[in-house]
Image (cartoon, rainbow, N blue to C red):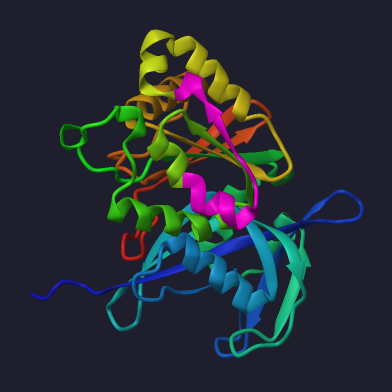
Amino acid sequence: MSPVRTVCAGGGVLWRHTAAGKVEVAVVHRPRYGDWSLPKGKAHDGELMVTTAYREVLEETGYSARVGRHLATVRYELKTGAQKKVAYWSMQMTTGRFQVNRETDDLQWLTPERAQRTVSYPADRKVLETFAEHPAEQLHELIVVRHAKAGRRSRFSGDDSDRPLDGVGEQQAEALVPLLGLYGVHHLYAADRLRCVQTLTPLAQELRTDIHVERALTEEAFAADPDAAYARLRELAAPVVGARAVCSQGRTIAPLLGRWAGDAGIELPPSRNRKGSVWILTLRGDTLIQADHIPSPLAGKNEL
């Protein structure tokens, strides 16, 4: 028997603040199906799912957004017998306006409760229920990146702190620019290692900003004083206009996030913490409520 084909797609709960301080979410009407739904669409070949989700929301609504936490991945069977997998993210509207397009001919901004009554499918209602579990306007993200590939220590003759990215690492660093841009990253921090700084350098050049060097977040500093490293990471998680991204090393990131998740009473998703991988930490105030993981910023490495 041949394997069942899987159709990958992405979408989002696009939300905004009203003048009265309330939250409204967008639902779209698709004339082809005669339904009301959350904006979503199929992935392009080799596209990261979060990129698919952002692109489809932009195309179907006309609004740019800042991506937040992953909400759900919905699976169901199509009439063809293929399986469809749709990953959804929370997205805060930033700019734009709706225009009729080839997929959608109307958009409504509704309260989350009314949106649940309006959408045509139970799967969309469940995604909206997950969205409403935490007040979106009170959440923010901290992005933690493991440095990109830098070759083997044994093959580098200089001081290990000066070991640079290799060719693949440079590709990963470039790929982080659009990926971290989806999350509205504007503030950059890196452990005091050349490879960590170089991982964020393309984004720093794009943003025309500096990279702040963090001596407490190297592997050696963490081994000497894990409490100081933990405290510093928690400090960097404070709310700020424009998200922060922190680049560090594998033997620092894994235990720090494990400790933080344990203190917060949440489970981390399965991960191998590979070089170039990205953690999206969602916080409410100083409380960690969710951690999402993207194994690679490179196209073709679908993460969900």
Range shown magenta: 200-217
Tell me if residue 173 comes above or below residue 116 in the rendering: above
At x 40%, y 34%, the residue is 268
Residue lying furthest right in this view?
20
Please name whichever residue, 110 or 193, is drawn nearer the observer in this view of the structure.
Answer: 193
Is residue 304 shown to the viewer in this render? no
Q: Position of residue 132 (x, y in %)?
A: 65, 47
Would you identify the image quadrant in which residue 226 lies?
Answer: top left
Q: Position of residue 202 (x, y in %)?
A: 50, 54
At x 37%, y 67%, the residue is 76
Q: Quadrant of the C terminus?
A: bottom left
Is residue 275 shown to the viewer in this render? yes
Left or right relative to 52: residue 91? right
Tell me if residue 295 comes above or below residue 228 in the rendering: below
Q: Is residue 85 magenta?
A: no
Q: Is residue 212 magenta?
A: yes
